[in-house]
Image: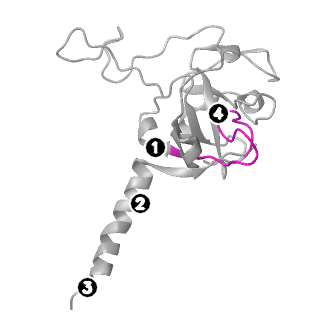
Amino acid sequence: MRFPTFLKSLLLGVPVGVTLLDCVGYVARVEGVSMQPALNPDASVTDYVFLSRWAVRNLDVQRGDIISLISPKDPTQKIIKRVVALQGDVISTLGYKIPYVTVPEGHCWVEGDHTGNSLDSNTFGPVSLGLVTARATQIVWPPSRWQQLPSTVPKTRVPIAIGKRAPAAGSNGSGHTASNSSSSTAPIVHPVEEVQ
């Protein structure tokens, strides 16, 4: 007995599709106002963003990246926020229980761009990098909003002191990657659901 072509395609397509969604990325709708003006700049437009799982496969996030993460307050929800500080950085907080925080190793400080309208690290503190699920790389819908998402920290939220980061895999600690060329430097990576 021969399988119809449709069933063969289905048997091949489902595992490939699941693998792509799990390893490469997916498109998600952004809800709420906590990331305004970068996302959902007005109430009449809902942005859909591409969330790249591949970009955070080594838990390598940079200051300014917009990331999707599991909410530390509710593990059933995913939130989308901007990375403001990395491990070792000293950040002034906005309403947190202490005015200044040194971000511990393996953590980052995340905030919504719409200060005061965001449930973020100013509420729950530094976030473990293990909760990061993807990085938002571009707005894919609506067409009038198609754009790459820049990886920038607002000038008012730059860390007070920048911590020293551990060398990345393949780095010799001097900022150069281990390779045959002595002049190559490590590449600089510039880089949902969201609830308020």
Residue found farthest to the front: 144
Tell me which numbered mark, 4 or 3, is placed earlier along the sequence. Answer: 3
Q: Which residue is mark 4?
A: 38
Residue 181 location (% of width, % of height): 19, 13
- Determine the residue positioned at 46% across, 36% down: 56
Quadrant assignment, res 114: top right
The numbered mark at residue 3 is: 3
Q: Amino acid at mark 3?
A: Phe
Q: Which mark is residue 35?
A: none
Rendered residue at 52%/51% (across/down): 27
Residue 149 visible in the current orientation: yes
Helix, strand, or loop for circle 1? Answer: loop
Residue 97 location (% of width, % of height): 82, 22
Q: Hey, which residue is sitting farthest bottom in the picture?
A: 1
Q: Give the residues in magenta.
A: 32-50
Which image quadrant for residue 68? Answer: top right
In the displayed structure, 72 sits above or below 23; it is above
Q: Are marks 3 and 2 in contact (CB under 8 Å)?
A: no
